[in-house]
Amino acid sequence: MSKTPEFPEVNEVVVGKVTEVTNYGALLKVSGYTGRGFLHISELPGRGLRTVFERLKTGQTIAVKVMSFDRSRGQFNVSLKRVGDDESKVKLREWKETERAHEIITEAARRIGVAPEQFLPDIEAKAERRYGALSEALRRAIENDETILTKIGVPKEYADVICDVARAKIRRKNIVASGIVEATLLSPDGATRLREIFLREIASAAKKQIDVTITTIGAPKYMVQVRAKTSKLAQGMLEKVLQSSASAIEKVGGTAKCSIS
């Protein structure tokens, strides 16, 4: 079993839970890492703050950007003010979906009688290779059937239990439309610029009360999923997102090829 990493990457946006608050800083626990996040008062948005207590409280969940490491203390320094509102909303939504997916697989493992700490990483790795994220595989499974999971190598008897737990915890009534964007942007900050373009598309759809997710399925391919109340609305928004994304990528010197799956 691989060792849990101590720190995330510099400039990575992560989600952490506030575990301790002082006048001048806060400590965060970030799932998947052994190191603690430290947020100094100077990295909080707004002016004139006298203490961190004015902005944060213990137990709060926030999206922050990793700035640097302090290995002697086992900490990584993070910033809240350097994360945009759109990026924060997207990251927190992704985090909530991931946490719920983990809860589903953990509960399924207990019902099956296998160790969750071994079962979860295996199922999650298989789901990510095919569907980009475990949460997406579970959504597709409850909207279709257990074959969504058996296709990625999950035994049918396990897939049935996972679907039963997922259906009890996830209630989806929306229609799903999916597509693929093959995007290439050959510049030093190409990955960052692509992410900014996708975040704008997600935020724009959210203003229309439409759920759009864009996940990497192996560079340079990105999976786009749109959820809406009707098939017509989902397909229409999917086409708009694909066209808009491709146009924005080409505008900054990249190439993009879109397809509907």
Image (cartoon, helix red, strand yellow):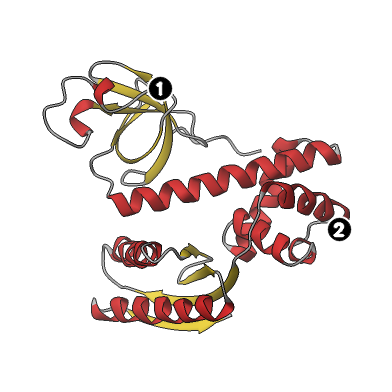
- Looking at the image, can residue 185 be seen? yes
Q: Quadrant of residue 175?
A: bottom right
C-alpha distance separating marks 1 and 2: 42 Å
- Report the amino acid beneath label 1: Thr
> In the displayed structure, would residue 130 be above or below residue 237?
above
Question: Residue visible at 35% across and 61% down?
Answer: 203
The circle drawn on residue 131 is none
* Residue 177 percent location from the top left of the image: 56, 74
* Residue 255 percent location from the top left of the image: 35, 81
Q: Residues within 10 Å of mark 1 (few under 14, many from 20)?
A: some
> In the displayed structure, would residue 58 be above or below residue 4?
above
Where is mark 2, residue-wise? 156
Where is mark 1, residue-wise? 58
Mark closest to the chain's N terminus, 1 or 2: 1
* Residue 259 percent location from the top left of the image: 51, 83
Q: Is residue 84 left or right of residue 242?
A: left
Question: Residue visible at 43% across and 63% down?
Answer: 209
Element marked by disc 1: loop
Q: Is residue 129 left or right of residue 57?
A: right
Nearer to us: label 1 or label 2: 1
Element marked by disc 2: helix
Quadrant of the frame with the C terminus: bottom right
In the image as oriented, which residue stretches furthest toward the left? 48
Q: Is residue 61 left or right of residue 23?
A: right
Quadrant of the frame with the N terminus: top right
Question: Residue visible at 34% across and 52% down?
Answer: 87
* Residue 47 percent location from the top left of the image: 12, 32
> In the displayed structure, would residue 39 be above or below residue 174?
above
Query: Which of 68/112 is in front?
Result: 112
Q: Check whether the beta carbons of the residues at disc 1 and disc 2 lie within 8 A of each other.
A: no
Q: Quadrant of residue 82?
A: top left
- Report the amino acid beneath label 2: Lys
